[in-house]
Image (spheres, helix red, strand yellow):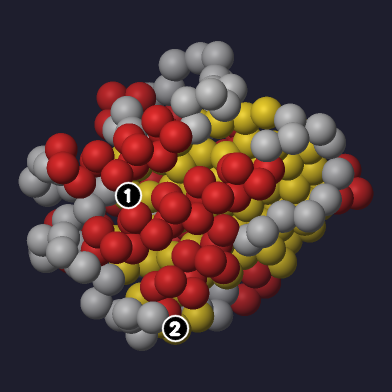
Amino acid sequence: MKHKSHGQFLLDLLSGNYKIKQNDIGADAHLSKKGFHFDTQTYTIENLGHLCIMKMKAMFGLMQMETIVLSVTHKDVPLLNMDWVGVPGRQTMLGELYDTQIAPWPDRRQQPYRKILERDGNLPDYRSGSAHWYDSILYPCSYHKSGKGISSRLDASATTFARVSVRQLETAPSCEPAVKEHKAKEFAENLVSHGGPAVDQVTKLFGAETARRLILHHMYGIMEY
């Protein structure tokens, strides 16, 4: 199953404007159990924040997933989560923007994301089928699409989604990093405490302590976890 790495694309975009250092996360970089294989890379982006790229394979490679988290602490922008999931005959792309800001996010900054949704209005929506604790802070301009034979369109939209996010950093207002990191920590703590399919699976495989470290420290860049 071929997949264009959206995480690498985002990393390349950011490297054009920021100094980036890959972090040494030791044995957590490669975790495997019961046929599930997780490869995680994290980066400290100078004067910006934290980037995590996590890839998972299971079912002898028939199921693949890539999760990207960009937690910006020096600019007052939304928390960005991107997920790509591929199984035989179906691909899913999520581009989620969460309100972890200090000040309200101007409507004009949401408009470019709405244009992506409008362009892909004829693609099937992805629906999880249940309510989530974060629904109240998930921006409606987030992207949720899933279907068969649409991988090229999903890749194109993921590329645009990443470009818009990086472009907005250029003019986004600066903020107090400690305050912004605290908001990201609240989000990550809620993710751990409330659980979910991915969190529950990692906890079941590797235990609560490892799952907490993966989510708070590696995915969201929380130093004290």
Q: Quadrant of residue 40?
A: bottom right
Residue closest to the eye, 95 or 79: 95
Query: Residue at the spot x=71%, y=66% of the render?
Result: 30
Check the image and report above or below for 193 versus 57: above
> Mark 2 — residue?
21
Left of 114 or right of it: where is 15? Answer: right
Residue closest to the eye, 115 or 92: 115
Please tell me how crowded label 2 is: few (under 14), some (14-19), or many (20+) other residues with Cα within 10 Å: few
Q: Position of residue 182 (x, y in %)?
A: 23, 53
The image's mark for residue 79 is 1
Residue type, numbered disc 2 = Lys
Check the image and report above or below for 33 versus 85: below
Residue closest to the eye, 191 or 58: 58
Query: Residue at the spot x=25%, y=59% of the render?
Result: 168
Dot 2: element:
strand
Q: Quadrant of residue 21?
A: bottom left
Dot 1: element:
strand
Whether residue 44 is visible here, answered yes or no, is: no
Left of 199 or right of it: where is 151? Answer: right
Q: Position of residue 140 (x, y in %)?
A: 32, 28
Q: Position of residue 17 (x, y in %)?
A: 32, 80
Residue type, numbered disc 1 = Leu
Query: Residue at the spot x=53%, y=24% of the render?
Result: 122
Please report whichever mark, 1 or 2, sits nearer to the chain's N-terminal start.
2
